[in-house]
Image (tube, helix red, strand yellow):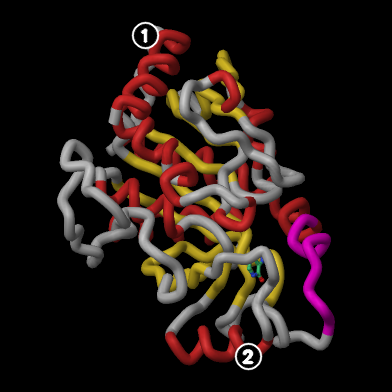
């Protein structure tokens, strides 16, 4: 608890009077949003007491606090993944700091592989639920009562109203490429096997990725509203007749980044207006 407080106090000292209510985690290749901030303050993770440091290529490691579309927000430019070697408490450290800073809504973005056969690379899927059978919970261990209860209910993990709003906005900016579905969490760093993709489809997954679930669980535990958006950067392993590579992920993320920026800007304005 003290570590979270120390980190939050450090950030507060730097941002002074600013009082953002919305935070966003920028997923792989989606850090482009950082160009759009006005009056921003950038705080490298390494300067924040207790914050882990981002290592993976394509992920910066900084908090950006600034105004986007006239709304004050905090962005995580670079996130922490299990496959990098962090433990779950490190991966989800920022969400608890956000809670202490007064964040009410968290937008989580990621790159994901499509499992639903009606999806195409370049679609955006609004997450309506998640599967994480094969990973331990980020809430394992002593419960931090100051944040939330021991056994959180999960029916409303992804905020229903925000799902509707996000889909409308995505459809507007992508000529109808909004999807809505279930995100399956895999620990990586291998892409899935074709058999895993078939199994996940049978289990009810529409997309798969290596992030988001730990952060969503910890933010939800603390009572933060969540909106999750996956950029479908590729079809899951074995679906198309070609091997997967991270280059495909980066290429698609680059192709849609203009749309992504507009979607997020409008989403933030809509959340702020509520
Ligand atoms: N699998 C897991 N994570 C991913 C994928 C995928 O196909 N694409 C982007 N992130």
Mark 1: secondary structure = loop
Residue 142 visible from this viewpoint? yes
Q: Position of residue 5 (x, y in %)?
A: 32, 23
Q: Residue at coordinates 63% horizontally, 38% vertically from top-left?
A: 54
Q: Residue at coordinates 41% horizontally, 9% vertically from top-left?
A: 13
Please tell me whether residue 188 is drawn above or below residue 120 in the rendered image: above
Q: Position of residue 28 (x, y in %)?
A: 66, 50
The residue indicated by pointer 1 is 17
Please tell me whether residue 258 is drawn above or below residue 240 in the rendered image: above
Report the disc number at residue 260.
Answer: none
Mark 2: secondary structure = helix
Q: Are marks 1 and 2 in contact (CB under 8 Å)?
A: no
Q: Magenta stretch: give its range.
A: 242-250
Name which of mark 1 and mark 2 comes first in the sequence: 1
Say whether mark 2 is within 8 Å of ligand 1: no
Q: Is residue 151 left or right of residue 12?
A: left
Q: Nearer the viewer, residue 117 or 187?
A: 187
Residues packed near mark 2 inside 10 Å, few (<14), some (14 to 19) or many (20 plus): few
Q: Residue at coordinates 43% horizontally, 55% vertically from top-left?
A: 214
Quadrant where the C terminus sits is top left
Q: Position of residue 87 (x, y in %)?
A: 49, 50
Quadrant where the N terminus sits is top left
Q: Position of residue 265 (x, y in %)?
A: 52, 38
Tell me the mark number nearer the camera, choosing from 1 and 2. Answer: 2
Residues packed near mark 1 inside 10 Å, few (<14), some (14 to 19) or many (20 plus): few
Please tell me whether residue 170 is drawn above or below residue 130 in the rendered image: above
The residue indicated by pointer 2 is 195
Q: How many marks?
A: 2
**Residue at far front of view:** 141
Residue 191 shown in magenta: no
């Amino acid at each position: 608890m003290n570590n979270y407080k120390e980190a939050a106090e450090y950030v507060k000292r730097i941002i002074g009077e600013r009082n953002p209510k919305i935070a966003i985690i920028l997923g792989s290749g989606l850090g482009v949003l950082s160009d759009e901030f006005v009056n921003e303050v950038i705080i490298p993770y390494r300067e924040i007491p207790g914050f882990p440091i981002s290592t993976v290529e394509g992920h910066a490691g900084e908090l950006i606090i600034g105004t986007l579309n006239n709304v004050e927000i905090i962005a995580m430019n670079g996130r922490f993944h299990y496959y990098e070697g962090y433990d779950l408490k490190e991966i989800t450290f920022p969400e608890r700091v956000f809670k202490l800073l007064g964040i009410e809504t968290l937008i989580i973005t990621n790159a994901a592989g499509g499992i639903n056969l009606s999806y195409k690379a370049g679609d955006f899927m609004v997450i309506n639920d998640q599967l994480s059978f094969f990973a331990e919970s980020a809430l394992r261990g002593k419960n931090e009562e100051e944040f939330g209860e021991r056994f959180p209910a999960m029916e409303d993990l992804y905020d229903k109203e925000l799902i509707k709003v996000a889909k409308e906005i995505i459809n507007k900016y992508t000529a109808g490429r909004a999807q809505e579905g279930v995100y399956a969490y895999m620990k990586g760093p291998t892409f899935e096997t074709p058999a895993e993709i078939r199994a996940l489809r049978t289990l009810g997954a529409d997309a798969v990725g290596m992030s988001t679930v730990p952060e969503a669980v910890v933010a939800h535990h603390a009572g933060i509203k969540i909106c999750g958006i996956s950029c479908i950067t590729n079809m899951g392993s074995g679906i198309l007749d070609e091997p997967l590579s991270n280059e495909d992920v980066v290429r698609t993320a680059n192709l849609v980044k203009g749309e992504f920026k507009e979607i997020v800007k409008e989403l933030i304005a809509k959340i702020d207006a509520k």
